[in-house]
Image: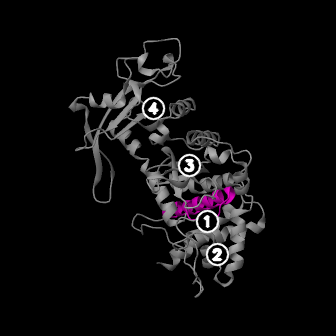
Amino acid sequence: MDLKLEEASARRFASYVEGLASEIGHADRISPLHDYCTGLMLPGERKSVEPMAARTAPARTAAQHQSLLHFVGVSSWSDEKVLAKVREMVLPAMEKAGPIEAWILDDTSFAKKGKHSVGVHHQYCGELGKQANCQVTVSLSIANHAASLPVAYRLYLPEAWSKNRVRRDKAGVPKDIKFMTKSNIALEQIRRACEAGLPRGAVLMDSGYGRDSELRTELTSLGLTYVAGILPNTLMWRPGSGPRRKGKPLNNTGRRDEPDLVPAEKVARGLPKEAWRTIRWREGSAEWLSSQFARMRVRVGHNKLIPEKLQSEWLLIEWPEGEKKPTKYWLSTLPANTSFRHLVDFAKLRWRVERDYEELKQEVGLGHYEGRGWRGFHHHATLCIAAYGFLIAEQATIPPSGPRCAPRIQAPPLPADYRPRGAAYAA
């Protein structure tokens, strides 16, 4: 690697950490902040506290271990303030490639074998693709086609945890943290993003969030558009039809009171052949990604809907060639004059958050924290996002003809007798 390039990157990293230091309070936290962020950036299979201590201070590993452990697990600095500072420093680099186009809602999971880590519960684990003991977090990211950055991140606390005072106290869960569904956590993150004045984009979400009609309705009331994955049984009126009963909200009797309501899958299967188009949306590793899509304007029925406030929106359907039935459905409040290709492009832009989590877990150790407490879990995630933000900013400094990856910080040699602890599924 070019030495001058490496030195310039190191200077920018030092300046970046100095910016973060302005939000962590006491001056004695600056050194462990720098070392923790450095540890997350260094090469290494594990990014938990002990191996990072060995990499950042090989001559005094035990003392460094205690320092980093206290900084991440005990110190009371604000995750929200640090994430806001990350956003402030990284957003200009992201916008060099174009304005923010989307806000992406999502969650990710971390498998855990034990039961004592905060929020661990037997629930659906996306990491394993099945029900398992895991922690689940909800996040909001801002994105354009070049990059994306998490701006809010919170652990989902299952109801069994939220009502267990002994477990809460042991894990240090703040008293003001009550049970909230994932959709409600997401909505709170959206509201705070609006209050903070973040550059707005269409809200993108999968069917886990998109099927929540109250969430979609609230996004509209906040003046936000969305592209939301939905389930094939979502009820709607085709063009030319609408609610027969006026003057009172719909209730959950659904189709018995409104016989013209039909599920999205029935709408899709009833479309003529000419309604389907093959559309490309992104260049993949080998070739352009493409599939068959159809779209139409519909009006969606749901519990508590006031018929007089009913508005048309896009129904987008994907039916890949060779499949026996459509595979994905989206609802969107993007303008009626939105082009077909643009609508598909937005629906598929949610892949950026999947790339986020892949790189956050593989490059900076998002899932490697081995502590059990609420504060440490969120502090570690905040610092991982900060490290990831620096990598995003560094990529913006690389010319098109330069290397694809940002320069990495060089690690000092480990002690010859060092043997890291830690396992993939720490308790």
Q: CA distance from mark 3 to mark 4?
A: 22 Å
Q: Earlier in the sequence, mark 4 or mark 2?
A: 2
Question: Disc number at residue 139?
Answer: 3
Task: Check disc 1 and give the amino acid type.
Answer: Glu
Q: Position of residue 158 (x, y in %)?
A: 60, 46
* Mark 4 burial class by Cα count in 10 Å: few <14, some 14-19, many 20+: many
- The reply to whether discs 2 and 3 touch (Cβ–Cβ < 8 Å) is no
Q: Is residue 351 above or below residue 227?
A: below
Q: Position of residue 28 (x, y in %)?
A: 77, 68
Q: Main secondary structure of the magenta part?
A: helix
* Mark 1 burial class by Cα count in 10 Å: few <14, some 14-19, many 20+: many
Q: Earlier in the sequence, mark 1 or mark 4?
A: 4
Task: Check disc 4 and give the amino acid type.
Answer: Thr
- Residue that numbered label 1 is attached to: 370
- The reply to whether discs 1 and 4 touch (Cβ–Cβ < 8 Å) is no
Tell me: 70 left or right of 107.
right
Q: CA distance from mark 2 to mark 1?
A: 14 Å
**Which mark is nearer the camera, 1 or 4?**
1
What segment is highlighted magenta in the picture?
A: 367-395
Choose top left, top right, bottom left or bottom right for residue 40: bottom right
- Residue that numbered label 4 is attached to: 333
- Please, which residue is most extreme toward the bottom here? 416
Q: Residue at x 42, y 12 (%)?
A: 244
Q: CA distance from mark 2 to mark 3?
A: 28 Å
Task: Check disc 2 and give the amino acid type.
Answer: Ala
Q: Residue at x 45, y 56 (%)?
A: 128
Q: Nearer the viewer, residue 108 or 161?
A: 161
